[in-house]
Image: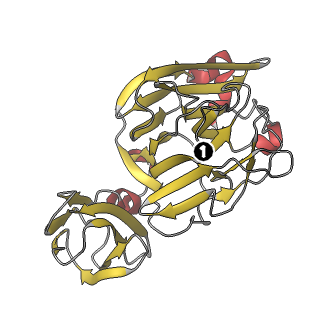
Amino acid sequence: MAQFVLAWSDEFSGTSLDDTKWTHEIGGNGWGNNESQYYTSNATNLNVSNGELTITALHETVGNNSYTSARILTKDKMEFQFGKVEARIKCPMGQGIWPAFWMLGANIDLVSWPMCGEIDVMEHVNNENKTHGTAHWDNGGHVYQGAPVITTPGEFHIYAVVWDSTKIQWLIDGNIFYGINIANGVNGTSEFQNDFFLILNLAVGGNWPGYPNSTTVFPAELKVDYVRVYKDQSEVSIEEQNLTEIIISPNPAKDLITIDKLSFGYNKTLTILDVLGKTCYSQEIEGKYVKIDISRLEKGIFFLSFINEKGVDQKLKFIKY
């Protein structure tokens, strides 16, 4: 079994979307599914605060669109082949509401859809007590395979895909609920041997969910705690492997936290940031183990930021109670 190490993440630790990682997509052309929303980059539709990303769908008119929302992607900024991708997500509920965390082949501009391939890590529609994991590709025409999993979409869950050259598996809260075989491009699945990028969006209406009605409540909010991409340990550098071994305990913590396995260099700066990005604590540290007194911090969400001598930065979230 593969041993995964963190290769890329967004913990949404700042006060705005990190534009080195994500790009807004703008428009309201139905997005291929007869959807009703216009995607904007407005703060009213997308907000980063308190360690979370919130995408908000509003009942407001832009052009021929009766709703606004947001859609972001990592295209040309972070694309990867194989590994594990996961996000901790809380979905909005309501007729015509369609949140999704998904992936498209990075060659989409060259070959179009569905020849580029699509992996839907998580989709939810309407008021269903289930979410869906699905793969789409071309095999002489559009084909797809997928399955639902019974859950509580209105609560936070960890949605993930583990993907290698032979298979794609879908997980919720660490448990596999579906998988498909892609070994040697079987059944036309060669699309899944290429690089993919990530997408987060909240659609309103469309061919699958139908459209909002008088029972649908707006604003509708999609909450994302984090997004993380892991690679097989054998495929990443020693610096990357060591960077991702850091452990914080306990978490949540009251007065003291222990930081262990600081093995990615001997000259490191440790900084504690609040959710507004303000520095609350900073020190130079050496070795692989350190205890930090957090008794003077107010209760809330904080981020430990580490920068090693190579300039590599990693942020880890913890809670002070």
Q: Secondary structure at mark 1?
A: loop
- Residue 92 in view of the camera: yes
Please give the name of the residue rendered at 58% of the width and 29% of the height, measured from the top-left corner: 125
Disc 1 marks a residue whose amino acid type is Phe
Quadrant placement of the N terminus: top left
Point out residue 137 in the picture as x, y percentages from the top left corner: 69, 25
Using residue 107 as the reference point, say whether residue 93 is left or right of it.
Answer: left
Q: Which residue is mark 1?
A: 218
Name the residue furthest right. 63
Looking at the picture, does residue 74 appear above or below residue 33? below
Instruction: Name which quarter of the figure residue 269 lies in.
Output: bottom left
Q: Nearer the viewer, residue 65 or 287?
A: 65
Left or right of residue 65: residue 93: left
Residue 163, image x, y percentages: 50, 34
Query: Residue at 56% across / 61% down in the picture?
Result: 47
Instruction: Assess disc 1: are there few (<14), some (14-19) or many (≥20) residues with their C-alpha within 10 Å of its C-alpha.
Output: some
> Up-down: is 85 above or below 140?
below
- Residue 96 versus residue 21 in the image, above or below: above
Q: Could you say where residue 179 lies in the image, as x and y percent from the top left?
A: 48, 21
Residue 213's quadrant in the figure?
top right
Q: Nearer the viewer, residue 55 or 19?
A: 55
Give the residue displayed 40% in from the left and 69% down from the top.
275
- Can residue 197 be seen here? The reply is no
Identify the residue at the far front of this view: 214
Q: Residue 95 appears at what percent x and percent y?
A: 61, 30
Left or right of 93 on screen, residue 249 = left
User: Which residue corresponds to the image point at 16% horizontal and 65% vertical from the top-left?
Assistant: 258
In the picture, which quadrant includes the C terminus?
Answer: bottom left
Establish if 69 lies above or below 289. above
